[in-house]
């Protein structure tokens, strides 16, 4: 396993590959590009909000079926 130090933490090749698959560009491309950083954070926030909505719907269904 190869690790690359990026902003104070070690990034493995698998992490880099997963990041590239998820976002379309690598961690190292992102770390010095404010536009890409904003894009990643916006996507993360959107996915977080979607997950919170899903949890709320599931909890509502569970309580309905009790």
Image: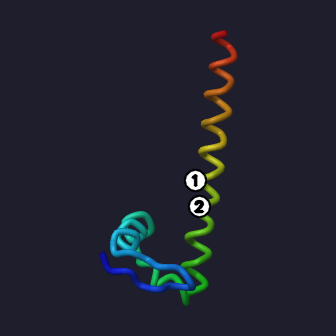
Report which quarter residue 18 is drawn in: bottom left
Q: Residues within 10 Å of mark 2 (few under 14, many from 20)?
A: few
Please tell me whether residue 65 is drawn above or below residue 30 in the rendered image: above
Residue located beneath label 2 in the image = 44
Tell me residue 28's x, y (percent). Answer: 45, 85
| Label ID, residue 62 | none
Residue sitting at the far bottom: 32
Tell me residue 14's x, y (percent). Answer: 34, 69
- Mark 2 lies on a secondary structure that is helix
Q: Kindly check if marks 2 and 1 are in contact, taking CB atoms under 8 A apart as contact.
A: yes
Please tell me whether residue 57 is drawn above or below residue 21 in the rendered image: above
Apparent side of residue 15 relative to residue 52 in the rendered image (left or right) = left
On-image quarter of the N terminus? bottom left
Q: Residues within 10 Å of mark 1 (few under 14, many from 20)?
A: few
Name the residue: 56% across, 70% down.
40
Report which quarter residue 64 is drawn in: top right
Residue located beneath label 1 in the image = 47
Name the residue: 64% across, 29% down.
57
Q: CA–CA distance between discs 2 and 1?
A: 5 Å
């Amino acid at each position: 396993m190869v690790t690359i130090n990026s902003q104070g933490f070690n990034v493995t090749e698998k992490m880099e590959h997963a990041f590239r698959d998820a976002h379309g560009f690598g961690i190292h491309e992102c770390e010095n590009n404010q536009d890409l950083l904003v894009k990643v954070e916006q996507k993360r926030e959107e996915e977080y909000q979607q997950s919170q909505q899903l949890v709320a719907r599931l909890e509502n269904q569970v309580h309905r079926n009790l």
